[in-house]
Image (cartoon, rainbow, N blue to C red):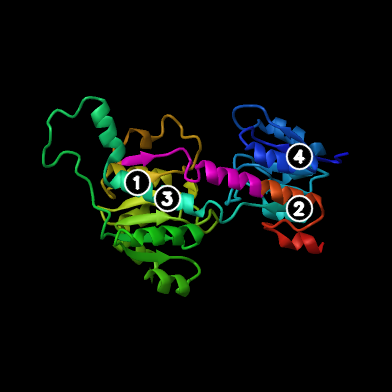
């Protein structure tokens, strides 16, 4: 007899993960195509012991007050800015994420965006498809910027930032980074130099964002920061959209303050059809898919499932974020 109940807020969870949760609990999966409406989510959590969610679900005091039996919220993501960790901790609800598993995949995507925007890959593809290619070859047709030998500035040298640095060494790039916490081990390992944030902005040919979304990082790349960057520089963001002031970015791109951007994340997702970025040729846009390989998304789901099983068994989940709940 399965005494536990778990609600899964998306129907795109691999069967392997559902089987793991199903081994210990009755599982109900949201069947809609998009995220569950807020009202649906608030209703469904009232009698569950576990919530398997993704970053589209806002887990706040309102939801937690409804979920009187809730023991664990397992977020199928590394970032957890969609969850009010303090409110969950106050109610003794465990919160987990999926760290590490998507590091290499997101680093791959970061390099893909960098290469795509610098070498105008998406623009060139459209040029060919739409019949713009008339001459066999011409010296200045679709010229872009080299990546090899350029300076890469990494804003946030966590797991993903370090994995990007590792890849960038293969492109012969000069590596700079800024982080709230200095990592001298990685500096030695990758030949990467720790610099001030302003120096990072001034010297980088490519600025790659890898910080979590926190009060101190929200819109930390804005008009002042774009004014410091090279006019030939590119912004790459595979972290969180709100780290960048999107309105300021649009102005910077329109005014030629920076050369271009490769973006996987945005302030509002999905992107509003009226968003000015959509009409810009010097921007490569992706729908928050940097971790989107079959292998990685399956591993993320399995990790979230195992966290739920551990919590319901009365064990400490492997990826527990608020360990203080265990002492209450």
- Is tag 2's residue or tag 4's residue first in the polypeptide sequence? 4
- Which residue appears at 25% of the width and 60% of the height? 149
Q: Between residues 157 and 138, which one lies in front from this camera angle?
A: 138
**Residue indicated by mark 3:** 108
Segment tinted magenta in the rendering: 283-303
For discs 4 and 1, the disc positioned in front in the rendered view: 4
For label 1, the SS is strand
The residue sitting at the top extreme is: 131
**Residue indicated by mark 4:** 22
- Is tag 1's residue or tag 2's residue first in the polypeptide sequence? 1
- Is tag 3's residue or tag 1's residue first in the polypeptide sequence? 3
Label 1 crowd bin: few (<14), some (14–19), many (20+), radius 10 Å: many
Give the image quarter of residue 225: bottom left
**In 3D space, how far apart are the residues under numbered discs 2 and 4 (Cα atoms)?**
13 Å
The residue sitting at the right extreme is: 1
**Residue indicated by mark 1:** 261
| Contact? badges 4 and 1 (CB < 8 Å) | no
- Which residue appears at 45% of the width and 59% of the height? 163
Q: Between residues 246 and 75, which one lies in front from this camera angle?
A: 75
């Amino acid at each position: 007899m399965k005494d536990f109940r778990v609600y899964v807020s998306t129907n795109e969870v691999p069967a392997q993960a559902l089987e793991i949760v199903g081994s210990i609990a009755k599982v109900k999966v949201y069947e809609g195509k998009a995220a569950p409406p807020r009202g649906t989510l608030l209703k469904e959590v009232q009698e569950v012991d576990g919530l398997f969610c993704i970053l589209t679900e806002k887990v706040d005091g309102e939801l937690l007050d409804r979920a009187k039996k809730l023991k664990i919220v397992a977020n199928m993501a590394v970032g957890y800015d969609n969850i009010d960790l303090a409110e969950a901790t106050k109610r003794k609800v465990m919160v987990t994420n999926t760290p590490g598993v998507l590091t290499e995949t997101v680093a791959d995507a970061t390099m893909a965006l960098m290469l795509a925007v610098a070498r105008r890959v998406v623009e060139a593809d459209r040029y060919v498809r739409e019949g713009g290619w008339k001459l066999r070859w011409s010296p200045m047709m679709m010229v872009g910027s080299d990546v090899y030998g350029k300076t890469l500035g990494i804003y946030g040298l966590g797991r993903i930032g370090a994995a990007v640095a590792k890849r960038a060494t293969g492109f012969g790039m000069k590596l700079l980074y800024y982080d709230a916490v200095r990592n001298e081990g990685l500096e030695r390992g990758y030949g990467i130099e720790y610099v001030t944030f302003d120096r990072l902005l001034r010297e980088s040919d490519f600025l790659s964002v890898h910080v979590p979304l926190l009060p101190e990082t929200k819109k930390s790349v804005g008009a002042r920061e774009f004014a410091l960057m090279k006019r030939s520089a590119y912004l790459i963001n595979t972290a969180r959209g709100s780290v960048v002031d999107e309105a300021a970015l649009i102005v910077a791109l329109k005014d030629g303050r920076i050369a271009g951007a490769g973006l996987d994340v945005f302030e509002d997702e999905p992107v509003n059809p009226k968003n000015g970025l959509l009409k810009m040729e010097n921007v490569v846009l992706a729908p928050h898919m940097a971790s989107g390989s079959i292998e990685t998304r399956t591993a993320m789901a399995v990790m979230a499932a195992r966290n739920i099983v551990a919590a319901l068994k009365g064990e400490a989940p492997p990826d527990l974020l608020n360990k203080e709940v265990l002492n209450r």
